[in-house]
Each structure stands twice: as structure tokens, then as C-alpha cells.
Amino acid sequence: MQDDRSRREAFFDTAAAETPYLAIETRHGELLFTRSANLRFGKQLFIRGQSKDMKFLTRAVSLLGEAGITLAGTTIVDVGANIGTTTVTALRRHGFSRAVAVEAYSENVRTLRINVAANDLNGVVDLFAVAVSDTEGQQDLFLSDVSSGEHTIDPSLPRSKQTERVTVRAVTLDGMVSRGEIDPARIGLLWIDVPRTETRALAGASALLKAGVPVVTAVRARKPYNWPDTKARLMSLLGTYTDFALLRGDAEERSTDLGCLLEGLNGNSDLLAFRRPVR
């Protein structure tokens, strides 16, 4: 396995000088393209044949199924869709019938469109080239020189990690609901991965949270994030949910007490929150 990874890494490094895109076929048959300039997320996707979010999505779907929550035929809202790994996996592998993919950075949007087309999903993905926050309007998007998945509208991104900034349109999920772009009754899962601003996205999603839509959100407890404030906001925003799980690691950590679950977190993870159906 290690020899295969080393071979794929060497191939990526060589091909990056010759082509703007490389393609990966996963073990489950998804066809994914990544920019050869994407030296962290894209390179690891090419080497491993899958991304971490694809694995965590599978865990989330399994846990929700165990709780009696059926996702087949529903819509996933993918906030911070990047190049579409979560969107494509949800539709191709987990029975979702539609996806709302929201991504702010133009290069990611271009690759996302390619991946949607490559997997014959053009008719079932609604793509919005915007950022998601707790207010609507024009905002600066700070581009990371580390990874395509780490661009952020949070101005506290260290300058050492910035390459440039671009102006993007920001929306709230509540605004998308009010404009008819999202129907809470059809949403099976809200997936959020927007570095440093996940709680801002959740704060603007009151309609989906009120409807009890299951949520998976990235949580970042490492420095330089303000973890005590983030933890308090998560507990407030997700206070009506009954069950929680951290999806990273060898085994999921589960609890009905969000505060207790988050208290022991000392790194980054992905948090699943849902309301257990009343039987």
C-alpha cells in the first residue's frame, strides 16, 4: 500500500508540471478531478483515492440510519462544497436525490462543475457560487496558500497563510430558504465545512435548525481558534438537538450531552447533531 501511495505521489508531482487537472477514480466508482496546483487537498485526494469528508459522511449516514433517520430521497446542503467530494459521494453512494452545493471560490466552483458533470449529476445539483455567513452582502474571501479547502471569510486568517483576497457575495441559509432556494422539508442533511466561520453559517440557518435537520459541522479546537467561544456558540445553536457524535478517530464518540462531548475535544473534528425520532 505504501509503495502504491509513493508511486501516486511521484506521479502527481510529475504530472502537475504538465497538466492543470488530474483525475481520480475512487474504489466506489466516483470520478473526481482535482487541480494539480491543489497541493494539499487535491494531492492527498489523488494519493489516497478518497478524502476525509467522504469517510466521515459514510459514518454520519450510518449513525443516522441506526437512529431510524432515513436519508434516501432527500437533499443534502453542502456548505463549503470545495470541489464536490461530499456532494458527489452523497448522490452517488448514499441515496440522496438532490444536492445544494454552496462554494465561494471561483476555481473551486469550476472544478466542482467538472466533477458534477463527470458523474452524470448535472440535473440534480443546484450550485451557488457564494459564501455562507450570518449576514448577507459583499465580503472579502481570504485565499489560503495551503489548501483549496481553507479559503475563508474570516479576516483573522494569518497573513503568512494568505495569498490574496477576492470579493464574493455572502448569503445566509435563512435567506436561501426565504428565496425558495432551499426547502427545509426536503433537506436530509446540512453539511458545513467553512474554515473559522462554521458557527456564523449555523447562526444564519435558524429555519433549518428549527426544522431539526441533521447537521454535520467541522469543529476546530486547535489554536489559533477561539475554542471557548466557539464551544459556547455550538451549544447554544444546537441546544434543541438530542444526540451528538464526533466522527473523526477510529471510533465515533457519542453522547446526548454536547457540552461533555466537546469538553474532551483537543483537536479538530466533525460533529454530527440530530434529533432522535420519537417512537
Image (tube, grey):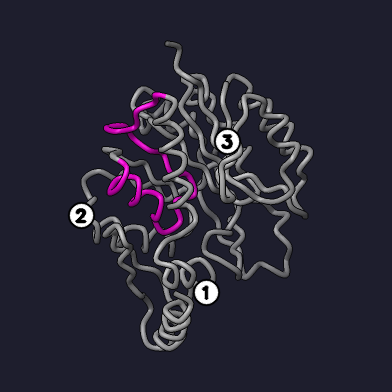
Residue contact between numbered discs 2 and 3, judged by CB atoms under 8 Å: no
Residue at position x 42%, y 29% in the image: 66
- Location of mark 1 (residue): 39
Instruction: Find residue 10 and report its horizontal and vertical position in percent.
Output: 46, 86
Relative to 148, residue 176 above or below: above
Relative to 254, residue 146 above or below: below
* Nearer-N-terminus badge (2/3): 2
Q: SS at mark 1?
A: loop
What segment is highlighted magenta in the picture? 68-94
Q: SS at mark 3?
A: strand
Instruction: Find residue 110 and report its horizontal and vertical position in percent.
Output: 36, 62
Q: Residues within 10 Å of mark 3 (few under 14, many from 20)?
A: many
Q: Amino acid at mark 2?
A: Asp
- Location of mark 2 (residue): 120
- Location of mark 3 (residue): 245
Question: Does residue 172 appear to the left or right of 158 in the view shown?
Answer: left
Residue at position x 60%, y 69% in the image: 146
Q: SS at mark 2?
A: loop
* Nearer-N-terminus badge (1/3): 1
Quadrant that contains the C terminus: top left
Instruction: Find residue 63 and report its horizontal and vertical position in percent.
Output: 46, 34
Q: Residue furthest top?
A: 279
Q: Is 72 part of what is drawn in magenta?
A: yes
